[in-house]
Amino acid sequence: MEKRRRSIEYDPARAKVAADNLRSAGLADVVTVVPGDAFVQIPKVPGDFDFVFLDAWKRDYKRFFDLVLPRLEPRGLLLAHNVVNKQAEMHDFLDAITRNPKLFTTIVSPSSEGMSVSVKLK
Ligand SMILES: C[S@@+](CC[C@H](N)C(=O)[O-])C[C@H]1O[C@@H](n2cnc3c(N)ncnc32)[C@H](O)[C@@H]1O
């Protein structure tokens, strides 16, 4: 089944910039920018996820984790940005991704911001 990629952004100006950038990159038919609150939009997305990238407000990461983990496919990936430079705002999320037995997680820091990479175990 073909997977549709979505990028959800609730600031209308930022959503337009994202859509314009995707169009310029020739990816408009690959990624759809969905304007709106991701907590409202994610439940409307059909099916499960093979890849989720979190880069919203850091204090919301744990709520996003709880929302998407049940729908992440085995071997699916959950990535989150700013897990090093903003770790103070997301201790609950970091505990969840490092302690959940359904996940293998590593943290990479190609810059000072840091990215978590979690794979859902089969
Ligand atoms: C740190 S910025 C990152 C934006 C983009 N990934 C980038 O690198 O330019 C965080 C973005 O998340 C958006 N955001 C935060 N909470 C959101 C939510 N619940 N639903 C949709 N977008 C949200 C904000 O409007 C903001 O544009």
Image (cartoon, grey):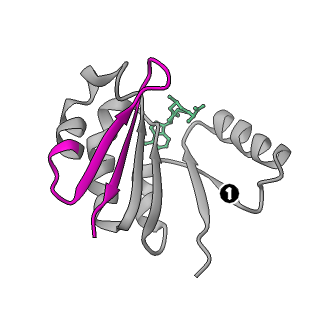
Q: How many marks?
A: 1
Q: Three-letter amino acid code at disc 1?
A: Val
- Residue 3, given in percent of the width and then of the height, sits at 59, 71
Q: Secondary structure at mark 1?
A: strand
Answer whether residue 45 is magenta in the image. Answer: no
Residue displayed at 65% across by 41% down: 15
- Residue 33, given in percent of the width and then of the height, sits at 65, 52
The residue lying toward the viewer, choosing from 41 and 73, is 73
The image quadrant where one finds the N terminus is bottom right
Residue displayed at 26% across by 43% down: 62
Residue displayed at 77% across by 56% down: 28
- The image shows residue 7, relative to residue 55, as above or below, that is below
- The image shows residue 75, relative to residue 35, as above or below, that is below
Q: Quadrant of residue 119?
A: bottom left
State left or right for residue 76 relative to residue 59. right
Q: Quadrant of residue 17?
A: top right
- Residue 89, given in percent of the width and then of the height, sits at 27, 24
The image quadrant where one finds the C terminus is bottom left
Q: Residue furthest bottom?
A: 1
**Which residue bears the numbered disc 1?**
31
The residue lying toward the viewer, choosing from 70 and 39, is 70
Range drawn in magenta: 98-122
- Residue 37, given in percent of the width and then of the height, sits at 47, 47
State left or right for residue 8 relative to residue 59. right
